[in-house]
Image: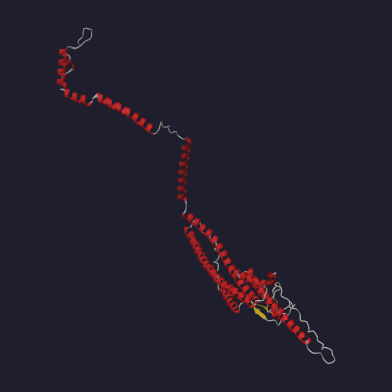
Amino acid sequence: MATLRDLFPDGKRTSDSGESQPGVDHQRSVAHKLGALLGDRRGDLEVTHRASDRHALSALVADAVRRPAEVAGTAAKSAGGSRARRRVDLLNVAVAGLAAVAVATTAVVGAVQAATASPADDALQALAADEKTIASAEATLADARQQIAGDVAEADARAEALRAALPPVATAPNPADIPPGETEVPDAAGRIDIIDPAALEKVSASIDTYRGELAGIALPPLPEPYEHSTVDDDSLVDVGAAIDRAQQHLADVDRLTAELRETRAQLRDHEAAFAAQLGVFAGSFRTAAEKVIAEHPDATSKYKDAVTTAVGAVAAADLRTDSGRQTLAQYRDAVFALVGSQVYANRVREEQRQREERERAESEQEQRPSVPGGRPSPTQPPPEEPKPTEPEPSQSPTGPGDGGGTGAEGASR
């Protein structure tokens, strides 16, 4: 192996300026010896020199430095100008931090409660909710049952009142049997029909049937009041049994509520059917009114108009109400006044006929020859009959079987 001493046997050389420099021959000798020592490296130097082109490397570095600046400038131009830098909102950061802390705290508390809660606690909460629902459902059920019972009683009372109001308005005293100038109806006075007898019989049967249907409505009894359960709060078995009992009570309340709904629907069906029958009955008054007006052509027109008005009120009224029943009495008074007006016209006509007969008899008597002695036969004037008076519309028919006419009299006034 060659050493440095072998490479430089002569030591340093000094140039003319005082510096030591090796000679040319010596340099070639050294190069030759280095080649022998290390081998010929010129081929490697050429490859290394070509792969490490300084100019290409410099171009790449310059391009890498220039490209980001160009990209940034292009983006700024496309956005329409320079873009402001985002500022950090310290308040939003603080709120977000507090929210994160709150969520984490809630999660921790919930996890702790879930870990420490007893299954019986959840069951107790369910039981308390059921018992609260039971209290509200029982109150609602009791109110509904009481309301339906009141509706049934009220419907029956109205039907009973209508049934009692029909006989007094069904007929009226015959004005022809009331002496002229008299206001009291004689006991022997006859009656005239105000309501068609067939229609009266039919509606009376309908009322009786309706009241029977109302009496047949049975309301379900209320359940026994629910009593609060005393259970062991730590015993899931006891709490579960109490929940089962509460659920059963709720089921009973629901069943009774459904029955009450059916009962209410049944009541409404009965009321609708009865109202339709009363509508047919009220409609029959118009035919009766037309008939009574036609049968009494000499009555004053104001009495005829009164009958027409009264029959319209009957047809539009709900006969189950007090005001509806009052229209029946008003119609009766109008018909009574109409017939009374016809009776007055008949009496005036009869009085005129009798007066004409008297005048004719007197005329015939004057034309007869005198009795012996030269004195004419004495003639006596016939007794004067009471002048008929037309009944006033404010007068209400009263008499046997009328049941009074106070209500109708007040209405006609």
Q: 152 or 189, which is in the foreground?
A: 189
Q: Is residue 154 left or right of residue 375?
A: left
| Number of numbered tags placed on the structure image | 0
Q: Is residue 320 visible?
A: no
Q: Position of residue 141 (x, y in %)?
A: 55, 64
Q: Position of residue 83 (x, y in %)?
A: 41, 32
Q: 181 or 225, which is in the foreground?
A: 181
Which residue appears at 28% of the width and 27% of the height?
60
Q: Position of residue 115 (x, y in %)?
A: 45, 49
Q: 301 or 72, which is in the foreground?
A: 301
In the picture shown, does residue 129 fall above or below 349? above
Q: The C terminus is located in which quarter? A: bottom right
> On the image, which quarter does residue 26 sit in?
top left
Q: Position of residue 352 (x, y in %)?
A: 72, 80
Q: 333 or 2, which is in the foreground?
A: 333
Which residue appears at 27% of the width and 25% of the height?
58
Which residue appears at 55% of the width and 60% of the height?
136
> On the image, which quarter does residue 298 sit in?
bottom right
In the picture shown, does residue 121 fall above or below 66? below
In the picture shown, does residue 359 fall above or below 45? below
Which residue appears at 64% of the width and 68% of the height?
323
> On the image, which quarter does residue 39 sit in?
top left
Q: Is residue 295 visible?
A: yes
The residue at the far bottom in this view is: 372
